[in-house]
Image (cartoon, helix red, strand yellow):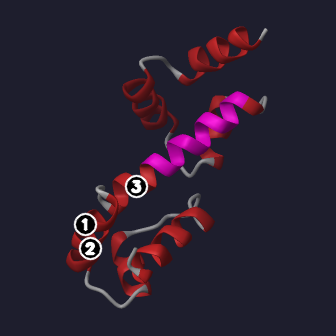
Amino acid sequence: MDARVKTVIRKMREFGDDHLSIDGLSKSVSLSPTRLRQLFKNETGRSPMRYLRDLRMRRAERLLRSTFLSVKEVAFVSGLKHVSSFVHSFKRRHGVTPSEFRVRVRSSVK
């Protein structure tokens, strides 16, 4: 994998709860935003922002499974600042709200 893409992925993992922009990420690896999007998609099959959203959703899933944080806190810790957008995206991805997901996960463990 291209070293610049690896660097961007590392930044996403380390600073996933911060506001990351394609402009900032591209500057950090000395590429134009267009070139970073192209290179990133060629290497990962996803755009940088889709990759970041997926990372945030996976973090949210782990937190819902393993903590007692509220849905609002999970959204915030995962880097998703707007709870309503988080709930909508989560439901689109899983077919259930974060609260319903948590109930299902916990009931399947018993």
Query: Which is in the foreground here, disc 1 or disc 3?
Result: 1
Residue 39's label in the rendered image is 2
- Picture layout, residue 12 above or below residue 100: below
Magenta stretch, overall SS: helix
- Of 4 and 34, which appears nearest the observer? 4
Q: What is the three-letter code of the residue carrying label 2? A: Leu
For marks 1 and 3, give the CA distance: 13 Å
Q: Does residue 81 appear in this view?
A: no
Task: List the residue tagged with mark 1.
Answer: 42
Query: Which is in the foreground here, disc 3 or disc 2?
Result: 2
Residue 51's label in the rendered image is 3
Farthest residue, direction bottom: 30
Q: Which of the 4 image quarters holds residue 32?
A: bottom left
Residue 21's label in the rendered image is none
- Earlier in the chain: of badge 3 and badge 2, it is 2
Q: Are marks 3 and 2 in contact (CB under 8 Å)?
A: no
> What stretch of residues is rendered in magenta?
54-65
Percent x, y for residue 97?
50, 20
Q: What is the three-letter code of the residue carrying label 1? A: Asn
Estimate how packed mark 3 is, as few (under 14), some (14 to 19) or many (20 or more) residues with alpha carbons within 10 Å: some
